[in-house]
Each structure stands twice: as C-alpha cells, then as structure tokens.
Amino acid sequence: MLLKDKVAIVTGASRGLGQAMAVDFAREGAKVVLCASSIENLKETEAQIKSLPNTNCILTQANVSIGDEVCEVVKKALDTFGKVDILVNNAGTTRDNLVALMSEQEWDDVLATNLKSVFLFTKACARPMIRQRSGSIINISSVIGITGNAGQANYAASKAGMIAFTKSMAKELAKRNIRVNAIAPGFIKTRMTDKLPDELKQKVLGQIALGRFGEPKEISDVAVFLASENSRYMTGQVLVVDGGLVI
Ligand SMILES: NC(=O)c1ccc[n+]([C@@H]2O[C@H](COP(=O)([O-])OP(=O)(O)OC[C@H]3O[C@@H](n4cnc5c(N)ncnc54)[C@H](O)[C@@H]3O)[C@@H](O)[C@H]2O)c1
C-alpha cells in the first residue's frame, strides 16, 4: 500500500474526481478526511470507502472559500487523526460566460471557490505539516489554466492562478520537506463535463490524441503517485493528464 497510515484531506470529495481520489487514497491505506459543502452529499463516498477492508474516513462540511470553515475541517482532521500528511485541493466550480456578459458575481464565485480556497487550505495545513516536517499538497488545476478558453476567462484565471500558487508554495515550503504539485486534467467524465453541450463535447473529442475522454480513476492514479513517496523528488510541477489534448 502506497499511503499506509497517512492522513489525507480531500476537498470536493462528494463526486467526480474528488470521490475517485478519496476512495483510491483509502484503498492505498490512507485515513481520509472527506470535505464537501454538505455532509449528506458525502454519504456515497463514505459507503464506497467502507466497502473496502481496513479503511477509515471522517466526513466534514465546509464552504471551501470561507476561512473559518476551512480551519474547522483541518482542526477536525488533527483532533481525530493527530496529523495531516496530504492535502488535495480539488473542490471547483464553473460559471461560464463571455467576459462582456460576465457578472461580477460570476467572476467572484469562481475565483473564491477555485483559488481562494487553495490559499485557505494550504495556510491551515502548512502549520501542522511544517511541525511534522513532511507533507504533500496536490492542487487540481486544469489544462484550461494553461491554454485559456473563450467563455471561461474566470475559470481559466483561477486555474492559472493555482499553477502560480503551486510553484510559489513549492519554493516556500521545500525546506520543510513539504512538496507541492498540481495536476492539470483535460476532459474527464464527471458531472462538471456532463452538462456541456454535445456539439462542444464532439469538438473536444476530435482534439484528443488518444481519441477518448478520461475517467476519474485516470486522475486519481496520478494523485496517488504525487501523494506517495514514489514522487519524493518532485515539487513545483504541473502534470498534464489529458490524453494528448494539449501537446
Ligand atoms: N472534469 C473535468 O474534466 C475537469 C478537468 C479539469 C479540471 N477539473 C477540476 O477538477 C476538480 C473536480 O472536478 P469534477 O469534474 O469532479 O467536478 P464536480 O462538479 O463533479 O465536483 C466538484 C466538487 O467540488 C465541490 N464544491 C464545489 N464548490 C464548493 C464549495 N464552495 N465548497 C465546498 N465544496 C465545493 C462539489 O460539491 C463537488 O464535490 C475541479 O476543481 C475542476 O475544476 C475537472
């Protein structure tokens, strides 16, 4: 098992990529702190984890863009398990619109959920990780943060911001043996991509070298690698996992 006895916080763990990562971390031996905006939404992830032998998880609720609620999640993790080894900043949202039509609210919501949350969770986890002189932080960015996308300027800016934050934190925390890396997924089959129009899906499909959309498991496999000792000489990196969408 690659994550035996590690403690991992996974935000946005109720479905999609967050659910896949939480379940795979548990399968690899980690005790998992599931976080979502409602406890009820975490029941399915909890059931999947409980169906695996010798697993342990707790359920926490937070709006990831509110500092006090984030601190409560990290406190609960420390009170229950005594440490935090792995943080996955995965919770994310979209409010797509052309900038000429985009409301201030649409901009603020996306930046707060996708980027401010990463600052809040990293700050809250940095202290215990510095104390224990180890940690792995994984930020789930997007290829859109590298390429940009018409109609997604708020999302693209938030995901590009995550990449710059990842590199800055890697430099800030390396001396304390805390590694910070990002994953930039391409088009993965989740509720976030389900809602896109069929015409757009077909267009994107035509641009993916491997000729298919990704599965959440194909992101969680990479997250397990980044969380584990197998990636011990990697920090400040952005791993693009997109089937060759952006080459
Ligand atoms: N699916 C893809 O193709 C894809 C591609 C690139 C990047 N990503 C990124 O991966 C991450 C997960 O995406 P997904 O496809 O699984 O999306 P999803 O919509 O299925 O899941 C998003 C998760 O984030 C949680 N969340 C959203 N806002 C929150 C808030 N304010 N507080 C707490 N939790 C909140 C949701 O409850 C949910 O658990 C996101 O950051 C997304 O931007 C996804």
Image (cartoon, rainbow, N blue to C red):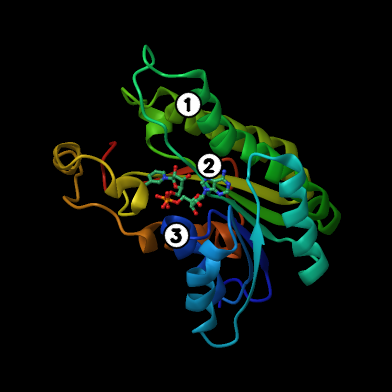
Q: Nearer the viewer, mark 3 or mark 2?
A: 3
The 10 Å Cα crowd at callout 2, few under 14, some 14 to 19, many 20 or more, is: some
Residue 128, position in %: x, y?
A: 82, 54
Looking at the picture, tell me which residue is in the foreground, 66 or 245: 66
Disc 3 under 8 Å from ligand 1? The reply is yes
* Quadrant occupied by the C terminus: top left
Name the residue furthest top: 100
**Tag 2, which secondary structure?**
loop
Residue 10's quadrant in the figure? bottom right
Give the CA separation, mark 3 to mark 1.
23 Å
Residue at left 63%, top 46%? Answer: 63
Residue at left 36%, top 47%? Answer: 192
Residue 217 in view of the camera = yes
The 10 Å Cα crowd at callout 3, few under 14, some 14 to 19, many 20 or more, is: many
Rendered image: mark on residue 106: 1
Q: Which residue is mark 2?
A: 237
Residue 144, position in %: x, y?
A: 38, 33
**Tag 1, which secondary structure?**
helix
Residue 13, position in %: x, y?
A: 53, 59
Q: Which residue is mark 3?
A: 15
Looking at the picture, tell me which residue is in the foreground, 47 or 226: 47
Report whether 119 appears left or right of 38. right
